[in-house]
């Protein structure tokens, strides 16, 4: 006789039971790390607009989440769902934390891993996996976000060297990175370049005044005729396939991460509703509050199932860009709606850093836009189902 499924308010459908033992272990290990190391401080970091990257990076390296889905060079070689549940727990703490891990592993490290020479891989990947070295990924420009094909950053050959000129904007980890993976136009097409910290002509300026992703380092990179040796170029790819394939890896982490943010908002609202007394009873006993909580719970579970299905497709080698766009578009939008609804349950308390919901809501406004706007993912899906491109 099958044992009845225990009702867990945070996972009513017991989606977690569909995970393997190893995946649950990774989920619980990362959750425990965030509970002990991140949650006691994240409200203060967000309020002050700081993120202690140099302090946290080695701890995240020891945890095994930096480049965890890559093979070799000190990376764990974890499967897609294991990486997904790690992202879910990281973003349940804060989107800025998951963003750091995504940029380090899925963008910077993955670009080097997929397209770098053996010398480049050995030079950078072990240290990045350990959190001893930090990377960033330069594709977006001040005037070209969704249209990277028209980027203005250029690299030209000069003897045996390359000369890089231009700028990149909204670069996570930009001012603290030991190496920047920078994509530029060349006569051969778009190429990737490894630009080391301290290279003459490279300037990194942090973006201030952010109302979102405050616990994250965001920078503008400027390249004033930066001279790079021939071995600074990533030899394994030419064209936008290089950066876009790495972006797809980062989007995969997002579609999982936002499930964590959504769950955290829902459980915060649920816990608050059960303890907040109004009219001589917990507000959890009022019909309108229960309606909000049930709607949140339904959408969290559906987003979790979407992420798990895409993860299993990815493990089978069957996931395609439209699948990733489906997850990113649906799950970010769902998480935002849950965060806003949760805030109303908490009332005025919901606008403070004592509770996570408005911090998540603010962060998710950035997540909605980066690694492909909701409009771009809509068009990806539109083309997938109609066969017609509507980008121009």
Image: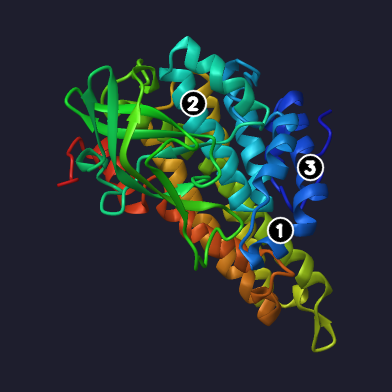
Residue at x-position 64% and y-position 63%: 46
- Of the pair 95 and 81, the residue shown nearer to us: 95
Q: Is residue 145 above or below residue 74?
A: below
Q: Which mark is residue 33?
A: 3
Q: CA distance from mark 1 to mark 2?
A: 27 Å
Image label count: 3
- Of the pair 372 and 335, the residue shown nearer to us: 372
Residue 310, percent from left and from top: 50, 32
Q: CA distance from mark 1 to mark 3?
A: 13 Å
Residue underneath mark 2: 110
Characterize the local packing of mark 1: few (<14), some (14-19) or many (20 or more) Cα atoms within 10 angstroms.
many
Residue at x-position 18% and y-position 45%: 390
Q: Mark 2 or mark 1, which is nearer the start of the sequence?
A: 1
Q: Is residue 370 something one can see in this rendering?
A: yes
Residue 19, percent from left and from top: 69, 30
Q: Does the residue at mark 1 contact the one at mark 2 (Cβ under 8 Å)? A: no
Q: Secondary structure at mark 2?
A: helix
Q: Is residue 348 left or right of residue 173?
A: right
Residue 257 occupies quadrant: top right
Residue 99, percent from left and from top: 56, 45
Q: Is residue 41 left or right of residue 252?
A: right
Q: Which mark is residue 94?
A: none
Q: Residue furthest left?
A: 392
Residue underneath mark 1: 42
Q: Is residue 268 above or below residue 392?
A: below
Q: Does the residue at mark 3 contact the one at mark 2 (Cβ under 8 Å)? A: no
Residue at x-position 55% and y-position 18%: 123
Q: Mark 2 or mark 3, which is nearer the start of the sequence?
A: 3
Q: Mark 3 or mark 1, which is nearer the start of the sequence?
A: 3
Residue at x-position 36% and y-position 21%: 229
Q: Does the residue at mark 1 contact the one at mark 3 (Cβ under 8 Å)? A: no
């Amino acid at each position: 006789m099958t044992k009845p499924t225990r009702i867990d308010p945070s996972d009513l459908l017991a989606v977690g039971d569909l995970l393997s033992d190893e995946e649950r272990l990774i989920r619980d290990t990362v959750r425990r790390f965030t509970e002990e190391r991140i949650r006691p401080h994240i409200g203060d970091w967000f309020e002050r607009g700081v993120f202690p990257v140099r302090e946290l990076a080695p701890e995240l390296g020891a945890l095994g989440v930096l480049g965890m889905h890559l093979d070799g060079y000190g990376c764990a070689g974890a499967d897609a769902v294991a990486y997904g549940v790690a992202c879910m727990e990281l973003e349940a703490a804060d989107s800025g934390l998951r963003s750091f891990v995504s940029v380090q592993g899925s963008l910077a490290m993955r670009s080097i891993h997929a397209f770098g020479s053996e010398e480049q891989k050995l030079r950078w990947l072990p240290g990045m996996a350990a959190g001893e070295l930090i990377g960033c990924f330069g594709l977006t420009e001040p005037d070209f976000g969704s249209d990277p094909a028209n980027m203005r950053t250029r690299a030209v050959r000069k003897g045996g060297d390359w000369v890089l000129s231009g700028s990149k904007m909204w670069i996570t980890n930009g001012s603290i990175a030991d190496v920047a993976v920078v994509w530029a136009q060349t006569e051969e097409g778009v190429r990737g370049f490894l630009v080391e910290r301290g290279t003459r002509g490279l300037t990194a300026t942090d973006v201030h005044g952010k109302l979102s992703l405050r616990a994250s380092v965001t920078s503008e990179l400027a390249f004033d005729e930066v001279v790079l040796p021939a071995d600074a170029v990533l030899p394994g790819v030419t064209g936008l396939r290089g950066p876009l394939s790495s972006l797809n890896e980062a989007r995969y982490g997002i579609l999982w991460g936002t499930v964590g943010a959504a769950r955290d908002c829902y459980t915060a609202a649920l816990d608050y509703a059960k303890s907040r007394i109004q009219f001589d009873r917990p507000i959890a006993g009022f019909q309108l509050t229960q309606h909000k909580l049930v709607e949140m719970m339904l959408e969290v579970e559906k987003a979790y199932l979407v992420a798990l299905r895409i993860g299993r497709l990815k493990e089978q080698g069957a996931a395609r860009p439209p699948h990733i766009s489906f997850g990113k578009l649906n799950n970010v939008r769902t998480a935002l709606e849950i965060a806003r609804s949760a805030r109303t349950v908490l009332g005025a308390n919901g606008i403070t850093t004592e509770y996570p919901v408005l911090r998540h809501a603010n962060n998710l406004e950035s997540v909605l836009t980066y690694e492909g706007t909701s409009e771009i993912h809509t068009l990806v899906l539109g083309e997938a189902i109609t066969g017609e491109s509507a980008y121009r």
